[in-house]
Every structure is written in structure tokens, then in C-alpha cells.
Image (cartoon, rainbow, N blue to C red):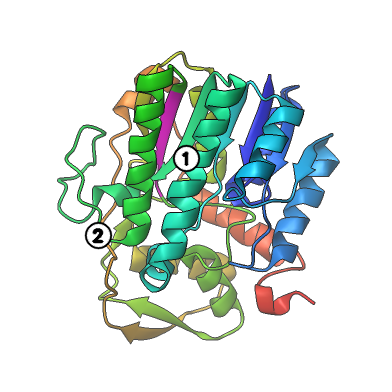
Amino acid sequence: MNVLITGGAGFIGSHLTERLIRDGDKVSILDDLNDFYAPRLKEANLDAVRRAGTVSFHPLDIRDEARVMDVFASERPEAVIHLAARAGVRPSLEQPLLYEEVNVRGTLILLEACRRFGVGKFVFASSSSVYGSTCPVPFHEADALHPISPYAATKLAGEQLCYTYWHLYGIRIVCLRFFTVYGPRQRPDLAIRKFTEMIAEGKPIPVFGDGSASRDYTYVDDTVEGIMGALSCDAAYEIFNLGNSTPVDLLTMIRTIEAKLGRSAQIRWLPKQPGDVPITFADISKAGRELNYHPRTPFAEGIGTFVDWYLNQDQRTPSAVR
């Protein structure tokens, strides 16, 4: 299959690209290598991808309609996996207009490109953040949604645009609600990587709230398996949770990293942040039935693999990159 991946130089995107190349698919990447975190980290991801095989790379912003259309005209993808986004709850509080431009308008431009060029399949990376703070756990795809951050609201808007383009134009679309993906190459702003670095260097780690907040951490290889299932399923329009269905509280996450590093964390306690939700917890029964999605990586095992990777690679944070 000829697949175009937006955000393919990122954490999840680079792992997914390697998997598609191994499976014999033709892959092209659209990524602007923006400075949300150090572009050299994403360039390192691209180097790893290129070692896996041939890939076509287009460095551009998904808000650039003319250039996006040019890429679709030249690559003629059969399927699009849309991972590119401005990510993160807390940064979205500071730059809500940017998040709307990239995550909503950018998604609309890609859907319109799919319509114009006859792309039959679109996989959209949504987020567990759309559930907000009032949904009963575990979160089910049919739950009423109450996003409490601009980031979450833009992801829900993306899902609605996807539904509209399926309804109007018959593009087969799958929306995947990711639940705190972690593993090698994880973004440096995310807690597992940030805490690992700070504990390893003997720096105090910031903990917002009382440490009881829980996240449904999902290992990247399991997430990639879910994306592959979405790519091959025949759904007209569906939404699936991709989580591990085993929430881990913040203090347990810290203790697990401490045990792997053999070092104790210094904790700096801070007030709870606006936009943060107390728990994410995926009901993955629908994805199990329809995508054959069955995550296999226990949290402690995944953390062990991540820490081993972290300790054996050169670029650890944006500040460490020269």
C-alpha cells in the first residue's frame, strides 16, 4: 500500500514508518520538524527510519494548503495516517490559537486533499483528552465528551471533521484515541522521559498535585499494532480507544523509573495544573473485537526498555543536543 504519514518524524510516527517499511509498504512522510522540541531529535528519528528502508520525506507545515496539495499530487497515497499535531494540554493553554490552526485547520486541509485526490482511507490520531474529567471509568467510545483544554477541544473537532468527510464524501475513516504513549524516542516534554532524565542527573522533578493522578500508559509498539489494525479494517467511520487498560498513578510511575535507574527521585511538589484530568482509563474491548488490538507490554517491562534506550543514546534532551 502507498501510505502518507503526517508527523512521521515524531515519536510514534517514526516507529510506525519503520513497521510499514518492514511490511513492504511504500511510505512518504510529511513533517515540518517544528521547534516544539529540538528538531535534531526528529532528524535522528528520520535517520533511524532511513536505515530501515526507503522513505520519501516532505518538510512542510500541514497548514500550507498549496504545498500539501502538491505532495498529494506527486505521491498519490492510497491511505493517510494523520499523526501531526500541536500536542500537550499545558502548552495549549498558552497558545490556543496556534493549536486551533494546526490541529483543526491542518486536519481539514488534509481531509480536503483526500477528497480531491481520491484517497480511500484516513486514520486520525485523536486523544484520550477528549473525555475530560467527568466521564466514568473506564472510558468508552460512546461516552459523552467534555474536553477541558484547548488541545482536547481541537482533537474532538478533528473527529467531527472526520465524521463530516465520511458522511459527505465516503472516505473511510478511523479515529484512534491514544492513551499516554511511551517508549524509545518519546518526546522530551512528556513525563516519563523528563523524569528519567532528571532522576538520572540528580535534579528535582516537578509533581503537580498529590501524585495520585493516574494515566493509562501504553507502550509504543502496542500503539503501532493498533494503528496497523485501523489501517487494514474495513470500517466506514469508527472511533477506537488505544490504551493499555491498566492505569498507573504518578508516584508508582516514579518508583518504577527509580527502580530501573537505581536512583531515588527528589520531588518538588507543585499545585495541580488547570486542564489536567485525574485519570485516564481505556475500555479497549471494541478495539479488541474489531482491530484485534491486544496490548502485550506490562508497564514495568516497557519502562525497563525505555530506560535502557535512554541510557544508551546520545541525545537526551533539547539542551543536550549540540
Looking at this view, is 272 or 192 the one in front?
A: 272
Classify mark 2: helix, strand or loop: loop
Quadrant containing the C terminus in the rendered view: bottom right
Verify whether residue 178 appears in magenta: yes
Looking at this view, is 264 or 122 the one in front?
A: 122
* Horizontal side of residue 204 vs 245, given as left or right: right
Q: Which residue is mark 2?
A: 148
Residue at 76 percent of width and 57 percent of height: 43
Going by the numbered disc 2, the residue's amino acid type is Ile
Specify the principal SS of the magenta part.
Answer: strand
Residue 116, x across and y down, in percent = 57, 25
* The quarter of the displayed image where residue 68 is located: top right
Residue 118, x across and y down, in percent = 58, 19
Is 63 rendered above or below residue 205? above
Is 239 rendered above or below residue 303? above
* Horizontal side of residue 272 vs 161, given as left or right: left
Q: Which residue is mark 1?
A: 108
Dot 1 crowding, Cα within 10 Å, few <14, some 14–19, many 20+: many
Going by the numbered disc 1, the residue's amino acid type is Leu
Q: Which residues are magenta?
A: 173-179
Verify whether residue 307 appears in magenta: no
Residue 214, x across and y down, in percent = 30, 59
Looking at this view, is 154 or 125 the one in front?
A: 154
Classify mark 1: helix, strand or loop: helix
- Residue extending furthest toward the front: 66
Per the rendering, the mark at residue 278 is none
Q: Are marks 1 and 2 in contact (CB under 8 Å)?
A: no
Residue at 48 percent of width and 42 percent of height: 107
